[in-house]
Image (cartoon, grey):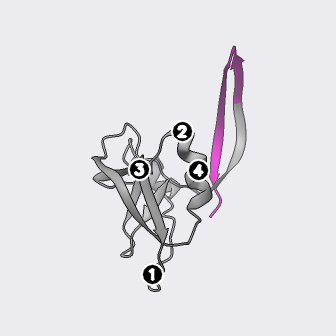
Amino acid sequence: MILMDSKGDKIEVTVKKDEFNQWREHLIENNTYVMYNFNVLPNDLQFKAWNHSYIMQFTTGTTHRVKEFPDHPPFEFVFKKFTGILAGNFQSDLLVYIIGVVDKMVLSQTQASLEKVVFNLRDSR
């Protein structure tokens, strides 16, 4: 989950798997909230959803309340261009958003409970 503050800075949030649906019901996209009682940890995850030095971790004691922030900027996705990826201009531990379409299925292989799919993507912008 990615949250954004009133300045537009974004931070990744982790939540326990069994509490995820609870938060999904309470945090509605494009609404604004004040969050209480969460942990702030170094962002040393193997794969990061956002390039921020820290992550927020919701705990069983984390609460929130609705608060209107009228000048809150809208969330904007930052899409990575295919040319940048192909040129090696990316962080290998940072997940990126792309706009593309599956151009061709190269290989589909199933082994026990594992399915491997190799495909080509084409930039659709």
Q: Which residue is mark 2?
A: 17
Q: Quadrant of residue 99?
A: bottom right
Measure the alpha-carbon separation of dots 3 and 1: 24 Å
Residue at (58, 60) in percent of width and height? 26
Q: Which residue is mark 1?
A: 69
- State which tag comes first along the sequence, 1 or 2: 2
Could you tell me the amino acid type at mark 4?
Gln
Residue at (46, 79) in percent of width and height? 73
Using residue 27 as the reference point, say whether residue 40 is left or right of it. left
Which label sits in the foreground, 3 or 4? 3
Q: Which secondary structure type mostly characterizes the magenta part of the structure?
A: strand
Q: From the viewer's perspective, is residue 55 above or below residue 46?
A: below
Q: Which residue is mark 4?
A: 22
Q: Which residues are magenta?
A: 107-125
Q: Secondary structure at mark 2?
A: helix
- State which tag comes first along the sequence, 3 or 1: 3
Whole-percent x, y for residue 14 in the image: 44, 46
Q: From the viewer's perspective, is residue 114 above or below residue 64?
A: above
Q: Is residue 6 a member of the stretch shown in magenta?
A: no
Residue at (50, 70) in percent of width and height? 75
Could you tell me the amino acid type at mark 2?
Lys
Measure the alpha-carbon separation of dots 4 and 1: 23 Å
Could you tell me the amino acid type at mark 1?
Phe
Measure the alpha-carbon separation of dots 2 and 4: 10 Å
Q: Secondary structure at mark 3?
A: strand
Could you tell me the amino acid type at mark 3?
Gly
Measure the alpha-carbon separation of dots 3 and 4: 13 Å
Q: Which residue is mark 3?
A: 61
Residues at circles 3 and 4 in contact by the CB criterion of under 8 Å: no
